[in-house]
């Protein structure tokens, strides 16, 4: 039986008031059972955030032990800068939203306004957040414009003087990024650039995505939309994998060289549900599922038609016997 909203608020309030006027020996077994923290936690989980905050909190006698935990999971603190980060206690709020959007200029190496760049907040925040982070959503975007060489070669300089610059400044190249351990990360969502596949464009995305996978041994769910095929072998506890390709490079390739097959072949046996959205799936063939000895019970295969998604032979489930 589920009781929601105001009716539940009235019942809890009436019970708490009545119990405050009774001796411990006069409390009925039913009332005592309902005030059990385990049962209360189950009841609170059915209520919305505002009801918990405005109604239940003011009348619940065991709020610090039971209600605060439920409210902490439902509530959300939003930080767009590091100003409020030092003052919050992670034990009081488990649902934290960090908006670390970066919109800096292209002069990454020699930018003089790094203190105003939101991307730098991650340098300060992540060493602490990485210890308790449970969910991560990462989105990348494109800056449309001609490259430097394309801009210059498109213009005819009458008195052009060729100059070769072998080194610019003190930075030879950006070093490989260092990834902090993410021991509690359970869910990871990645949205890649909506552009044609390019080795230059996707190399940074591959490094970042793969680095996070290697740093999160307890990942259970990954949703990725990208134009590359990562290695999920380090994710030994991965249960749900949702993969969609932005734009495929599979035209004319045989099934054994299909990059999606190679990616699936390296997936751990812990995967239970696999959702594939492939740009150019081999016509008339099925992508082989390599880990048939594992726990995979659900395979949903889809294919792009233009920019819309249609399911091949409708949405279907493939059940595989456990070994």
Image (cartoon, rainbow, N blue to C red):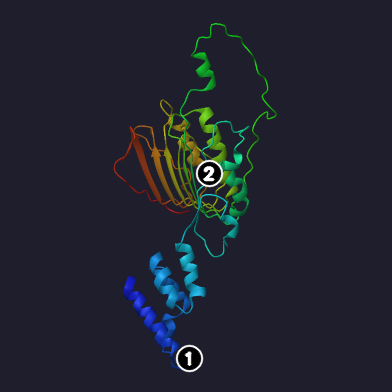
Q: Position of residue 161 (x, y in %)?
A: 61, 9
321 vs 75: above or below:
above
Q: Position of residue 230 (x, y in %)?
A: 52, 39
Q: Can see residue 1?
A: no
Q: Residue furthest right?
A: 170
189 vs 170: above or below:
below
Of 199 and 272, the residue lying toward us: 199
Where is mark 1, residue-wise? 24
For image coordinates 41% across by 85% down, the residue present is 17
84 vs 315: above or below:
below
309 vs 241: above or below:
above
Q: Mark 2 and mark 1: span between their CA atoms?
A: 56 Å
Q: Position of residue 177 (x, y in %)?
A: 63, 39
Q: Nearer the viewer, mark 2 or mark 1?
A: 1
For image coordinates 38% across by 80% down, the residue present is 13
Report the side of 160 relative to 8 (left or right): right
Of 79 and 122, the residue lying toward us: 79
For image coordinates 42% across by 53% down, the residue present is 321
Q: Position of residue 231 (x, y in %)?
A: 54, 40
Of 220 and 80, the residue lying toward us: 80
Mark 2 Cα-neighbour bin, 10 Å: few <14, some 14–19, many ≥20: some
Using the rendered view, name the quadrant where residue 207 is placed. top right
Where is mark 2, residue-wise? 232
Which quarter of the figure is the N terminus placed in? bottom left
């Amino acid at each position: 039986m589920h009781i929601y909203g105001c009716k539940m608020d009235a019942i809890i309030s009436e019970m708490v008031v009545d119990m405050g006027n009774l001796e411990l020996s006069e409390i009925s077994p039913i009332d005592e059972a309902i005030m059990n923290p385990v049962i209360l936690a189950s009841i609170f989980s059915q209520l919305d955030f505002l009801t918990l905050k405005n109604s239940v909190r003011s009348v619940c006698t065991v709020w610090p032990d039971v209600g605060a935990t439920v409210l902490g999971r439902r509530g959300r603190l939003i930080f767009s800068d590091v100003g409020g980060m030092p003052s919050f206690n992670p034990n009081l709020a488990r649902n934290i939203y960090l908006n670390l959007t970066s919109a800096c200029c292209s002069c990454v190496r020699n930018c003089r306004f790094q203190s105003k760049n939101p991307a730098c907040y991650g340098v300060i925040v992540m060493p602490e957040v990485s210890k308790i982070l449970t969910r991560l959503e990462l989105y990348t975007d494109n800056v449309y414009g001609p490259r430097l060489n394309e801009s210059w070669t498109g213009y005819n300089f009458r008195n052009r003087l060729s100059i070769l610059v072998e080194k610019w400044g003190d930075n030879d190249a950006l070093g490989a990024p260092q990834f902090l351990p993410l021991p509690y990360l359970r869910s990871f969502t990645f949205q890649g650039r909506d552009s044609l596949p390019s080795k230059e464009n996707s190399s940074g995305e591959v490094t970042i995505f793969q680095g996070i996978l290697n740093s999160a041994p307890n990942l259970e769910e990954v949703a990725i939309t990208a134009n590359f095929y990562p290695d999920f072998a380090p994710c030994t506890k991965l249960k749900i994998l949702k993969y969609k390709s932005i734009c495929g490079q599979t035209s004319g390739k045989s099934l054994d060289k299909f990059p999606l097959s190679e990616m699936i072949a390296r997936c751990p046996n812990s995967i239970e549900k696999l959702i594939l959205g492939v740009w150019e799936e081999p016509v008339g063939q099925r992508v082989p599922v390599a880990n048939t000895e594992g726990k995979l019970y659900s395979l949903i295969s889809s294919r792009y038609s233009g920019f819309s998604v249609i399911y091949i032979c409708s949405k279907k489930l493939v059940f595989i016997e456990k070994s």
